[in-house]
Amino acid sequence: MTVANAPVSFGAFELTVGINPHVPDGEQVLDQVAAAGYAGIDLGPVGYLGTGVQLGERLAERGLGLAGGYLELPYADAKALKCSLPQLDALLDMFDAARSVVSGGAPRPTIADVGSDQRRARPGAAVRDHSLGLDAAGWRRFAVGLKEIVQRCRDRGYEPTFHHETGTYVEAPWEIDRVLELTDVGLCLDTGHLILGGGDPVSAIRDWGGRINQVHLKDARRSVMAEIIASGGATAEIWSREAFPALGQGDLDADSVLTGLRAMGYVGWLVVEQDIFPQTAERFERAALDQHANRRFLRERGL
């Protein structure tokens, strides 16, 4: 396994970049990730870490590989999906440009569902309330759209990975099962989002191990999620209430997860994530300390 980090650990992702004034500069994030001893990084929003060959040069200067790039798409809505294709192409173009400079394996297009207002308003509820999920026709449309995106990635030379996400139509374990039944896409196991979605990462490795082709290693606090659900909070509160702590400080059984990944022979990227909302400029300093601590946590476990 090769250990990477991601801009979201420093508060830089789709809900903050270009919106939140406290988001750090992309080069600051690259510097901290390299200084902490990570071997790679996820892309973050397209352009955040650099554009074109510039991105590859910034990575190469710091000895970092490119692990992947995240994109949410509306698979069950054919018209909206067609309008979203330029976003996917921009992501893959960024991969192409970076790979012209950076050595190593191909990054993974990390594709997720875009969700809905209803799902974002009730995070974590679908594990018990299946009525929140897609109906049979919706799943058929979803599968058609996802297969189209998977093939588009493969036609460009990239093997995608599907990322389950809180607040989307693929959040609960039963919804992940459905995606794996309907398509041949690989799975990005996000341990933190799985915990908040009502699943168990150790069982997931046993049940879905043959499909896992990317891992986002993330701790999570079930107690925070329970508070959000009890108060009727929306998905955004997962980040504002910091439901994702540093490794070893939440409910993730990281040792058993790593044992399971080793037992299944997983040799891909292990992307450490600790999603935050940067509510002050000083939050970057604590994020940097956390990512150094997360790297030490894994180094102590042989990674």
Image (cartoon, rainbow, N blue to C red):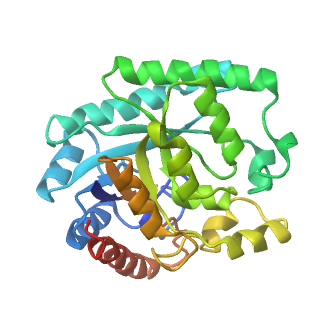
Q: Position of residue 90 (x, y in %)?
A: 39, 31
Q: Position of residue 240 (x, y in %)?
A: 63, 71
Q: In the drawing, does residue 152 fall left or right of residue 156? A: right
Q: Residue at x 36, y 81 (%)?
A: 289
Viewer-nearest residue: 36 or 60: 36
Q: In the drawing, does residue 39 fall left or right of residue 19? A: left
Q: How many marks?
A: 0
Q: In the drawing, does residue 134 fall left or right of residue 290? A: right
In the image, is residue 213 above or below residue 124? above
In the image, is residue 230 above or below residue 57? below
Viewer-nearest residue: 24 or 295: 295
Q: Position of residue 10 (x, y in %)?
A: 42, 67
Q: Is residue 124 visible?
A: yes
Quadrant location of the N terminus? bottom left
Q: Position of residue 252 (x, y in %)?
A: 54, 69
Quadrant location of the C terminus? bottom left
Viewer-nearest residue: 88 or 174: 174
In the image, is residue 280 above or below residue 194? below
Q: Is residue 46 visible?
A: no
Q: Residue at x 23, y 67 (%)?
A: 31
Q: Residue at x 31, y 39 (%)?
A: 107
Q: In the drawing, does residue 162 fall left or right of residue 168? A: left
